[in-house]
Amino acid sequence: MKIIWYGTASIAFESNKKRILFDPFVPLRGSKVATKLTDYIGYKEIFVTHGHFDHISDIPKLIERSSSAYIYCTKTPADTLMKSGVPRHNIRLVRPGESFTAAGFYLRLWQGRHADLEVASDVVFSPRIFRYAANLPVALSRHLSYQENGETLVYEILADGKRVLLLGSMNLADGIDYPDSCDVLILPYVGYKDNLAQAEKIISRLGPKKVILDHWDDTFPPLTDTVDTSAIESRYTDIEIIKPEHKKPIEI
């Protein structure tokens, strides 16, 4: 199995020439991330972890170019996408507890929980607000229009004898017995003033063999900035922490 990171939470999986894609997103102007909408053309099975704009807002444009693709998502992002022009027949509603096969991958869905977004106040007082002021109307409008509504998912993905847990945000729901000891945990490393402390809680609970960090990059300035990942990269000696490069496949 190969894992390709396109930036933010955009993750693709490849196995036996078959591919699935999660949370496609095109960075806003000013980002150093070079992902383009054309990078996603050809993916026919597209999965959504939750309905925030940085996870779904470019899907309508993608469907215009790839009208045979299916979008797997919960009700809130489905409603948002249909209001944005995505035809109902392109959407497959899913919910926690379901399991199914898509493009040769076996997937199970678990209830997740969104990060607490403790860093939001820091953005307001950042000088980047002025530097990237042109992005603000778009970002703020999308932030208000694209709701999560408590529907963040955790995906369990199985192929080639490997098991991956992909978190939609850096948090877990209480009282759920998630599968542990997975081969790879994909962890969005953002959302807290102390990201390491939150990551440690999750890693301790799930016990992965490897961790791939995503969502740490600056893809929609000025609402984001590059997250310092050095603390978690040096924290573990028994678990491999992988900070991926954009579009460079990782073999697992």
Image (cartoon, helix red, strand yellow):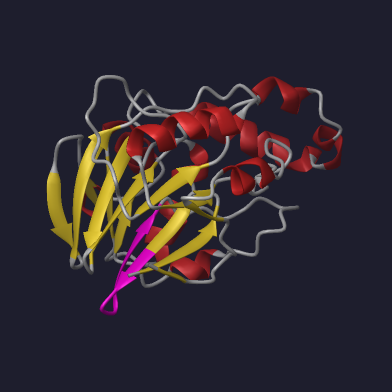
- Residue 15 in sight: yes
Image quarter hosting the C terminus: bottom left
Is 56 positioned to the left or the right of 144 in the image? left
Is 121 positioned to the left or the right of 67 in the image? right
- Asked if residue 4 is among those painted magenta in the image, a careful observer would answer no
The residue drawn where x is 53% and y is 50% is: 237
The residue drawn where x is 40% and y is 62% is: 12
- Taking depth in this image into account, of 159 and 232 the one nearest to the observer is 232
- Looking at this rendering, what residue extends furthest in the front direction? 237
Dividing the picture into quadrants, the one containing residue 77 is top left
- Asked if residue 17 is among those painted magenta in the image, a careful observer would answer yes
Is 173 positioned to the left or the right of 129 in the image? left
Count how many numbered circles sit on residues in the image: 0
Image quarter hosting the N terminus: bottom left
The residue drawn where x is 54% and y is 69% is: 247
- Residue 146 in sight: no
Main SS class of the magenta portion in the image: strand
The residue drawn where x is 43% and y is 49% is: 186
Q: Position of residue 4 (x, y in %)?
A: 46, 65
Q: Position of residue 182 (x, y in %)?
A: 30, 50
Q: Position of residue 7 (x, y in %)?
A: 56, 56
Q: Which residues are magenta?
A: 13-22
- Taking depth in this image into account, of 201 and 108 the one nearest to the observer is 201
Q: Position of residue 33 (x, y in %)?
A: 66, 59
